[in-house]
Structures are given as C-alpha cells and as structure tokens.
Image (cartoon, rainbow, N blue to C red):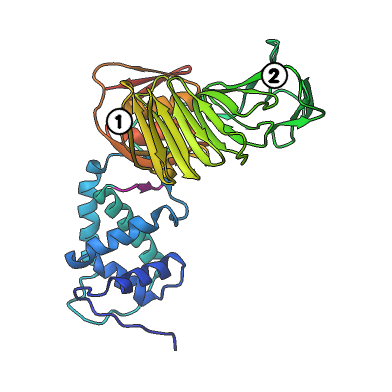
C-alpha cells in the first residue's frame, strides 16, 4: 500500500513544517498528499506570507526547470494572479475536509503549483518566472515575427601593445602571440590570455591594454596571476611585469577581479575618479561612463576605496556606490546581481527601461533610441545572456513597452 500522509488544513503554527515540505517538493521527494497540502495553503491567508518567504529564499537556488526568468512588471499580473487563485479554489472545492487525500495526477499538481509560485513571486515583487513565449500563438506583432541579425555577445577583445600594434584576440590562433619584455603573451585553447614569464624583470616597464567592444567579453590572467574578467565595452591597462612595491592597473567599464595575494605589493585599481586598494580579494567594479553611479562590490577579502579624499573600507557582502557628485555610500550588496554578467545572465531589480536598454545595447552591440515619452515603470527579473534579443523584447512588450528594430537599432516606442 502506498504511503499516505495526512495534514490538517488549518492555521499553520509551525513554519518549519511548511519549509520542510517545500524543500521536499524542490527535491522531488514530495508525496501526492504533501503536494496537495501545499496547494491547499494557497487558499488560506494565514500561511501565504510564510510560503512566500520560503519561495523567495529558495528561488535563486532552485529555479523551476524549463522556465525562463524575464523582466516584467508585477502589476500586470494582478488579474492573472486572482484567476489562478480562483482555479485553486475550484481544485480544492471538495469541502472543508481536514484530511487531504493523495492527488490523482502529480504532473498536473506540479504545473499548478509552479504557476502559483510564479504568481506569488510576482505579487510579492520577487523575480518572475515565465514559460518561454509561444510566438505562433501570441497577438503582439511588433517584434514577434521579426528576424534580425542581432546576436548575443561572446569572447571578443583587442589587445593593444606598448608600441601601438593591435591583436584581435577572437581572430588570433592559440599559442604565443607576442613577446613583451620578459613575458610571452599566450592565448590558451579556452580563449583566455595569459602572460608567461621568460626571464628576469625588465629594465623598462611595458604596458598593454585589453579592450572589449560592445558585444564582447574576455578573461585575462595578469603577470602576477591575478584573474580578470572584462564585461562588454570595457578595458584594462596593465604592465607586462609588476615591478616596485605596488601593482597598479586602470579600468573603464565593468571588470571582475580575483587578485593574487602578495602582501608586499598592494594591488590598486584606478577608474575615472576612484582608487581601490587590495591585498588579495574578489570584487567587481562597474564604472561605465554612461551610468549614473560607480559600484564596487566585494565578495571576499577587504578593499579600501578612495574617492575625493574620502576613504571607506568594504567588508564582504558590501557595495560602495559613488554618484556623479562624488558622494560615496556603503550598503549591503546584491552580490548575485553584481556578478550576473560574469555568470552568464542579466539580473534586473527594480530598474527602469533605460537601465535595461543600456545593458542590452552593450551586450548585443545595438543602438537604442526613444520615440515619444519614456516609460517610467520599474522591472525585476533574470534572463540568460544567450537569449535572442527579439525574445527579450517580445516578452517586455507583453507589459506595455513596445519596440521596433531597424538593422542594429532598437527604437523604444510609447
């Protein structure tokens, strides 16, 4: 006889029980009765807040398989939310029974629970998970059937040597590309660029610059072993050998560092207005000229930031934000959001359309123009950087923002 577990539909006194059952559901270990128990709680106000909290906690860790995360407005789902709740009530319309019998169709219950989770997240303002858009059945026409040559970015960069000569790294063959001072510049089979020391420290320090175009990203290992990831439209200038008592580099755009430890040689990162000093740590710097702020996010270790003679020390999990006026503020960081680009996706957390379009413009190498008034809605969501840009725009159109594509230009319509 199959196992049967009974649960009372009543005010949930022990949130740990709900958390335990939800974890079992995530692990695909729930019995049919336990799934019905979760479904039943969606029609009770007493447990809704607790379940939302658990869902929010588990969401990034356990995404629902086959469902993409996309940026949309939560307000547009209020009606759908209510209709799904009504459907749940219909499913549970068997009466006021205290004991829940096993569900006859686990796959149906799974789909319903997944849908409700989606809507609760939307309703609470967390990330939203939507099934991929079925273009054949959708009525939104502007982007739906458009086939463009706009492609997601990839590993692209240009290396400029001390003498001004340039190497297009995405076109260069694997192996030694050049000799700079005491180091060979080597492109690995993975596409990564490394510096292989071949002799004593040179008398003259030579500088190289790696630049990623729009639609490009690249990984570099500096001569000291520090690993560097460049986002699109970014650059780093560095010596081919670190001599003296300091290691100094300068950047533009967005760069993630995993600095090799060397207590005798502090590592300095300089952007347009600030200097970051570290001994060995992991951190991300976003310093695009077209953004309103410069953000430095610390993952581990410790960094000291100097901005207009003001000095602040960051702890792991903190972010320093410098605005156009040079004001520096420290706050708790959304580390997942700060590293989303490095980990292969976009993450939007209560941002406006212009912020989203700037990120898309850099990664897809497109120009963006606005016709008429600019929508002021805020968006939340997460989506992979490998998605077709038409699919991203198409889903955003479902929330009342419209687009038109002309060659490599995206026009945002009112």
| Mark 2: few/some/many CA within 10 Å (<14, 14-19, 20+) | some
In the image, is residue 105 above or below residue 123? below
Label whose residue precedes the other's in the sequence (2 or 1): 2
Q: Which residue is mark 2?
A: 205
- Image quadrant containing the C terminus: top left
Q: Main secondary structure of the magenta part?
A: loop
Local secondary structure at mark 1: loop
Viewer-nearest of discs 2 and 1: 2
| Mark 1: few/some/many CA within 10 Å (<14, 14-19, 20+) | some
What residue is drawn where x is 38% and y is 60%? 111
In the image, is residue 237 above or below residue 261? above
- Image quadrant containing the N terminus: bottom left
Residue 378, located in which quarter of the rendered image?
top left
Residue lying at the far bottom of the rendered structure: 1
Q: In this rendering, does residue 133 appear at all?
A: no
Q: Are marks 2 and 1 in contact (CB under 8 Å)?
A: no
The segment highlighted magenta reads: 126-131
- Depth check, front residue: 254 or 242: 242
Image check: 102 left or right of 224?
left
What residue is drawn where x is 42% and y is 70%? 24
Residue 239 x, y percent position in the rendering: 66, 23
Image check: 123 left or right of 247?
left
Which mark is on residue 352? 1
Q: Is residue 91 magenta?
A: no
């Amino acid at each position: 006889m199959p196992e049967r577990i009974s649960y009372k539909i009543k005010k949930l006194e022990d949130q740990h029980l709900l958390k335990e059952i939800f974890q079992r559901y995530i692990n695909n270990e729930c019995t049919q009765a336990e799934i019905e128990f979760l479904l039943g709680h969606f029609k009770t106000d007493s447990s809704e807040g607790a379940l939302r909290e658990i869902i929010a906690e588990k969401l990034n860790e356990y995404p629902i398989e086959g469902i993409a995360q996309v940026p949309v407005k939560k307000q547009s789902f209020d009606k759908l939310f209510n209709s799904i709740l009504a459907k749940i009530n219909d499913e549970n319309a068997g009466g006021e029974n205290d004991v829940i019998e096993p569900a006859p169709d686990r796959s149906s219950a799974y789909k319903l629970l997944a849908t409700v989770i989606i809507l609760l997240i939307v309703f609470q303002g967390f990330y939203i998970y939507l099934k991929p858009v079925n273009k054949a059945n959708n009525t939104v026409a502007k982007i739906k059937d458009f086939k463009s040559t706009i492609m997601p970015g990839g590993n692209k960069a240009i290396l400029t040597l001390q003498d001004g000569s340039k190497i297009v790294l995405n076109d260069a063959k694997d192996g030694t590309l050049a000799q700079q001072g005491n180091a060979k510049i080597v492109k690995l089979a993975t596409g990564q660029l490394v510096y292989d020391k071949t002799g004593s420290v040179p008398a003259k320090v030579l500088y190289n610059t790696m630049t990623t175009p729009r639609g490009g990203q690249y990984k570099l290992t500096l001569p000291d072993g520090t690993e560097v990831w460049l986002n699109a439209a970014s650059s780093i200038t560095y010596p081919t050998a670190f001599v003296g008592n300091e290691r100094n580099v300068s950047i533009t755009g967005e760069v993630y560092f995993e600095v090799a430890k060397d207590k005798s040689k502090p590592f300095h990162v300089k952007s347009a207005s600030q200097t970051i000093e570290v001994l060995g740590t992991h951190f991300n710097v976003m310093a695009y000229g077209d953004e309103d702020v410069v953000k430095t996010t610390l993952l581990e270790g410790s960094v000291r930031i100097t901005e207009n003679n003001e000095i602040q020390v960051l702890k792991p999990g903190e972010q320093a934000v410098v605005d156009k006026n040079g004001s520096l503020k420290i706050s708790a960081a959304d580390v997942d959001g700060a590293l989303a680009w490095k980990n292969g996706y976009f993450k939007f957390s209560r941002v406006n359309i212009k912020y989203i379009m700037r990120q898309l413009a850099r990664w897809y190498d497109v120009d963006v123009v606005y016709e008429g008034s600019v929508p002021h809605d805020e968006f939340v969501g997460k989506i992979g950087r490998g998605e077709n840009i038409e699919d991203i725009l198409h889903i955003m159109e479902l929330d009342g923002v419209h687009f038109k594509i002309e060659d490599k230009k995206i026009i945002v319509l009112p």
